Amino acid sequence: MKYKLAVIPGDGIGNEVIPASLEVLNSLSAKCGFELEYQHFDYSCEYYRKTGKMMPEDGIDRLGQSDAIFLGAVGYPGVPDHISLWGLLIPIRRAFHQYVNIRPVRLLKGIESPLRSPGEIDFIIVRENNEGEYSNVGGRIHEGTPFETVVQESIFTRMGVDRVMNYAFTLAEKRRKKIASATKSNGIIHTMTYWDERFEALSMNFPEIEKSKFHIDILCAQFVQHPDWFDVVVASNLFGDILSDLGPAVVGGLGIAPGANINPEKEFPSMFEPVHGSAPDIAGKNTANPIAAFWTAQMMLEHLGEKEAADMLMGTIESLTAEGKVLTRDLGGTASTSDVTKEILRLISKQ
Ligand code: NAI
Ligand code: MG
């Protein structure tokens, strides 16, 4: 098999962890007998500074010709974050109907959780990725006067809510058959009561699944106090975004947190990007942890159907953390980005 990958390193540490991941992908493709053809795109904040746009007019069409998109992170001091998000990530997620954002939270062997007795932690956050609170419907009137008024609308459609929930229920069916819904229907009385209503209605089709719902505030507390309770957690765009920084924080931080923006019907390419941003504070120093990007590449291999390579990569990441010898600073080690990459390549070559 041969796959066309659109590669967008983006800004900051994206330019370190993505090239490292391509080395790892190359070694796996040689080992497992498939081909990867990379097409590199320099869409980023740097591109924005040169052109006034995050990507060219035909950017979406060009990316659409790939089997998957592999992205580092975008964001750079001096370019407002809403420009990088609305100029690149959100258009890609929406144009390609990547309506599910999957973010696994798993405590790997050898990784120290900041929790004293974390127990087994292994759950998946399923975040709605196309609508919800991240909407550009709204506006501002009476600007600069005492009557200044700002309105920001949330958009919840039946199709949008149902499809992400159905995905989450189906995922739970394949796992430990537990699902938790993140809500806030006590305060947000229109959209969140609707969210609850659809969750109840759809759960009828999955009678064997144990379901629960939590208001987002207590859910955040339970992520810290009882992370072992969870299997699949389904959340709206905003709540899912927040939970997917909190979840990884209890299992070792953003340096290892992977993510995927999925178009489940495979009508369009899906996009794979680690949860972390461009980390300008450590960019260019060869200290970024590449594991988040490697694990993200692993999710991409799985999505493409290269199970052998995906399993080999996950096993390799787990042996590296279990060994605990070659870890970056965020995990308490002293290794550089290239040290970790070399060690992963060495472990793969031994298999
Ligand atoms: P961030 O994830 O870039 O960094 C947060 C903290 O985690 C920093 O201290 C950073 O050094 C550390 N960190 C992140 N990834 C790491 C890694 N792989 N290894 C070791 N340490 C790591 O989030 P922040 O600082 O809020 O945002 C920085 C920029 O990134 C902003 O411009 C923001 O808009 C953008 N951003 C982009 C995202 C994307 O492209 N998907 C996601 C989140 C933020
Ligand atoms: Mg986020």
Image: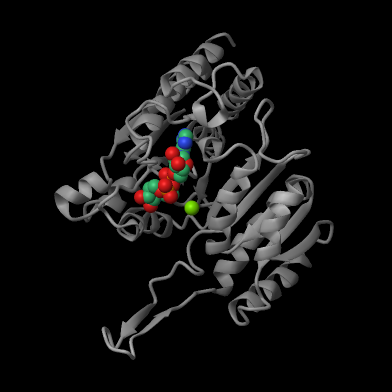
Left or right position of 191 against 34: right
Quadrant location, ligand no. 1:
top left
Q: Position of residue 324 (x, y in %)?
A: 62, 20
Residue farthest toward the top in the current orientation of the protein: 350
Residue farthest toward the bottom in the current orientation of the protein: 147
Left or right position of 15 against 213: left
Check the image and report above or below for 276 versus 134.
Answer: above
Check the image and report above or below for 317 versus 142.
Answer: above
Q: Which colour scheme is used?
A: one colour
Q: Does residue 269 show up?
A: no
The answer to which of 133 and 261 lies nearer the viewer is 133
Q: Position of residue 251 (x, y in %)?
A: 64, 39
Q: Where is residue 253 in the image (x, y as percent from the top left)?
A: 56, 39
Check the image and report above or below for 225 versus 341.
Answer: below
What residue is shown at x 48% (from left), y 20% (from top)? 335
Left or right position of 100 against 73: right
Number of marks in picture: 0
Residue farthest toward the left in the current orientation of the protein: 50
Q: Position of residue 110 (x, y in %)?
A: 67, 25
